């Protein structure tokens, strides 16, 4: 029988061999000082250095250390997903392996989840030690995420977060969705989301592993998260509404042209020579396409194995 723990610490890593011994020692010190029962789950995302050897040694020396090694680099979302799947603590803490996240923040994060009943606490690195090429896009993404999701956090992408165990078991991460776990948790029905100012450490070893592709992938993933959260089980409500609106606009233009030609100005130029004619045709065609897209999405959803998969909090009478 699996023993319930206070905290599971999930740490994705990629080529961080210099940081791991110091990070584990720091975590161990904090955990023992606060008498937490805990596990540390390292997910090696296809490292090419000696990171996995360090994880293996830590596992041999400390039973609370667990490890998963990917055959190749799949990305942070995949690493977090696998960590969430095996996490067993009442509170799940995520942090980066580069020593920029401070384990000293863990006790307060744990307290906010357990005592104040938050579902998720996101760290806010109010004072950052990142270059301007990283901070400016981050501010832009955070602004867009706040507007689209209605979750008013300053730092959606902070690696240091705390979750209720039920929250991480209710979401699925893929692609680059790790940036937007707060809206995923919200759309799963966990609405008490807060943030805490956390200390941001200057990078001690190595270099940032995130490339320029995040500038494109970030906004696209945000749109995916928002769309799936709001319309994942009812795509016709989105596509059908847009399609109907466009078709009605096109039809009204066509009706106006027909009435004008037949009853008002019979000697005017041909309908095909008027701009309104092409507006009406294009609007009706695009409207029909949107409607058909929604219809096809509904057919796909009806045949999905998860079409009746809902998150149940409590059940009586079974």
Image: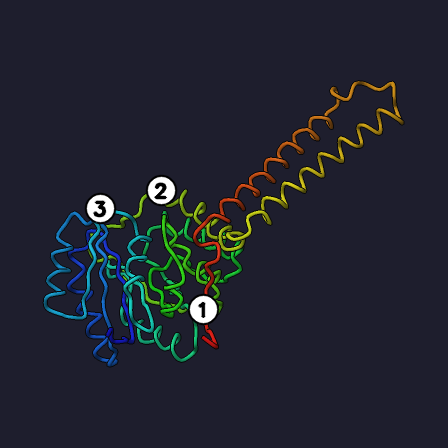
Q: Nearer the viewer, mark 1 or mark 3?
A: 3
Q: CA distance from mark 2 to mark 3?
A: 18 Å
Q: In the orientation shown, which residue stands out farthest toward the front?
A: 318
Q: CA distance from mark 1 to mark 3?
A: 34 Å
User: Residue 195: image x %, image y %?
Assistant: 42, 68
Q: Name the residue tied to disc 3.
A: 72
Q: Which image quarter is the C terminus in?
A: bottom left
Q: Nearer the viewer, mark 2 or mark 3?
A: 3
Who's the residue at 43% across and 73% down the image? 118
As helix, strand or loop, the secondary structure at mark 1 comes to strand
Mark 2 packing: few (<14 Cα in 10 Å), some, or many (20+)? few
Q: CA distance from mark 1 to mark 2?
A: 29 Å
Tell which of 183 and 286 is nearer to you. 286
Precedes in sequence: disc 2 or disc 3: 3
As helix, strand or loop, the secondary structure at mark 2 comes to loop
Q: Name the residue tied to disc 2.
A: 213
- Find residue 246 and report its image quarter: top right
User: Residue 307: image x %, image y %?
Assistant: 48, 54
Precedes in sequence: disc 1 or disc 3: 3
Q: Is residue 104 left or right of residue 303?
A: left
User: Residue 205: image x %, image y %?
Assistant: 19, 55
Is the Cβ of the residue at disc 2 closer than 8 Å to that at disc 3?
no
Who's the residue at 38% across and 56% down the image? 172
User: Residue 31: image x %, image y %?
Assistant: 23, 75
Q: Name the residue tied to disc 1.
A: 194
Above or below 263: residue 24: below
Q: Is residue 271 left or right of residue 37?
A: right
Circle count? 3
Q: Which image quarter is the N terminus in?
A: bottom left
């Amino acid at each position: 029988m699996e023993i319930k723990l206070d905290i599971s610490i999930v740490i994705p890593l990629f080529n961080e061999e210099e940081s791991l011994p110091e990070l584990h020692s720091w975590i161990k010190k904090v955990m023992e000082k606060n008498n937490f029962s805990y596990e540390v789950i390292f997910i090696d995302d296809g490292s090419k250095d000696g990171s996995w050897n360090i994880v293996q040694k830590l596992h041999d020396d400390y039973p609370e250390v667990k490890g998963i090694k990917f055959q190749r680099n799949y990305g942070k979302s995949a690493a977090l997903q696998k960590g969430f799947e095996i996490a067993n603590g009442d509170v799940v803490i995520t942090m980066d392996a580069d020593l920029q996240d401070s384990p000293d923040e863990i006790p307060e994060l744990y307290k906010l989840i357990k005592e104040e009943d938050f579902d998720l606490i996101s760290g806010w690195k109010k004072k950052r030690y990142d270059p301007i090429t990283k901070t400016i896009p981050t501010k832009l993404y955070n602004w867009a995420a706040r507007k689209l999701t209605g979750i008013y956090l300053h730092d959606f992408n902070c690696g240091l977060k705390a979750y209720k165990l039920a929250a991480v078991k209710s979401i699925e991460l893929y692609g680059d969705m790790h940036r937007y776990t707060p809206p995923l948790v919200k759309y799963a029905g966990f609405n008490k989301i807060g943030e805490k100012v956390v200390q941001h450490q200057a990078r001690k070893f190595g270099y940032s592993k995130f490339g320029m592709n995040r500038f494109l992938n970030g906004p696209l993933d945000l749109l995916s998260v928002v769309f799936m959260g709001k319309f994942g089980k009812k795509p016709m409500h989105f596509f059908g509404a847009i399609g109907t609106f466009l078709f009605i606009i096109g039809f009204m233009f066509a009706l106006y042209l027909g009435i004008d030609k037949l009853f008002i100005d019979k000697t005017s130029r041909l309908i095909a020579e008027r701009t309104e004619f092409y507006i009406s045709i294009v609007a009706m065609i695009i409207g029909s396409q949107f409607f058909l897209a929604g219809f096809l999405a509904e057919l796909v959803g009806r045949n999905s194995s998860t079409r009746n998969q809902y998150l149940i909090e409590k059940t009586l009478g079974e």
